[in-house]
Structure formats: C-alpha cells, structure tokens
Image (cartoon, grey):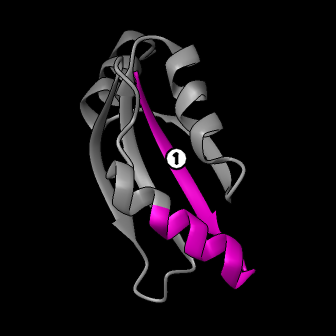
Amino acid sequence: MKFMLTFTWASDARIRDEAIERFRKTGGLPPTGVTLLGRWTRADLSRGFDLLEAEDLRKVTEFAYMWSDLMKLDITPVVEDDDLNAVFQAVAR
C-alpha cells in the first residue's frame, strides 16, 4: 500500500536545525519494511512530501515516530490511477 506523508517544518529555528541535522546524519531514510518512492520539499522549506510504500502500517507509524518530535506529520493512504480504475471497473453498473 502507498502512503503520502506530508511534513511541516517547525517554525522554531532550534527545532528546525535539529531536524536538518538528523536528516544529514540519517538521510531521512525509513525503517526496513518501508520503501521511500520519492521525497519533495517546497523551495521555501515550509513543508514537504514523502511517497512511501509498505505492507505493514506499523512500519509507517515507526517512521512517523522517528520524526514526530521535530515536525508535524500527516499520513494519507493513496491509490494510483490504474488501481482506482480497476475499482471503478469492478463496481461499474
């Protein structure tokens, strides 16, 4: 299953600097069991987006826990167009 994780940087410069340092040390990589498909950060550094894939939601939650002390996170399950179209075909009247 795919998830879009949206993160919002803290407005506090000290916390933001700590998040940047953690990212530099770890590469911001998720734990084993979660695949990072892509990451984008707004040019103004106010927020960003990670596209993740995992079979076990607990692993996605583990990744969120690794960063939730430094930034606000929102995780949304997402469906690709081909999968969505398959759903539409299955329930077509």
Residue at the image position 55 percent from the left and 17 percent from the top = 57
Which of 88/74 is in front? 74
Residue at the image position 69 percent from the left and 78 percent from the top = 14
Task: Locate residue 89: give its quadrant.
Answer: top left
Which of 71/56 is in front? 71
Residue at the image position 41 percent from the left and 50 percent from the top = 50
**Mark 1 residue crowding within 10 angstroms, few (<14) / some (14–19) / many (20+):** some
The location of residue 4, given as percent across then percent down, is 47, 44
The magenta stretch is: 1-21
Residue type beneath disc 1: Leu
Residue at the image position 47 percent from the left and 66 percent from the top = 21
Task: Locate residue 72: give its quadrant.
Answer: bottom right
The location of residue 2, given as percent across then percent down, is 40, 30
The location of residue 66, given as percent across then percent down, is 58, 39
Residue at the spot of label 1:
5
Name the element at disc 1.
strand
In the image, 47: left or right of 28? right
The location of residue 69, given as percent across then percent down, is 72, 50
Q: Is residue 30 magenta?
A: no
In the image, 31: left or right of 47? left
In the image, 4: left or right of 82? right
Q: Is residue 7 magenta?
A: yes
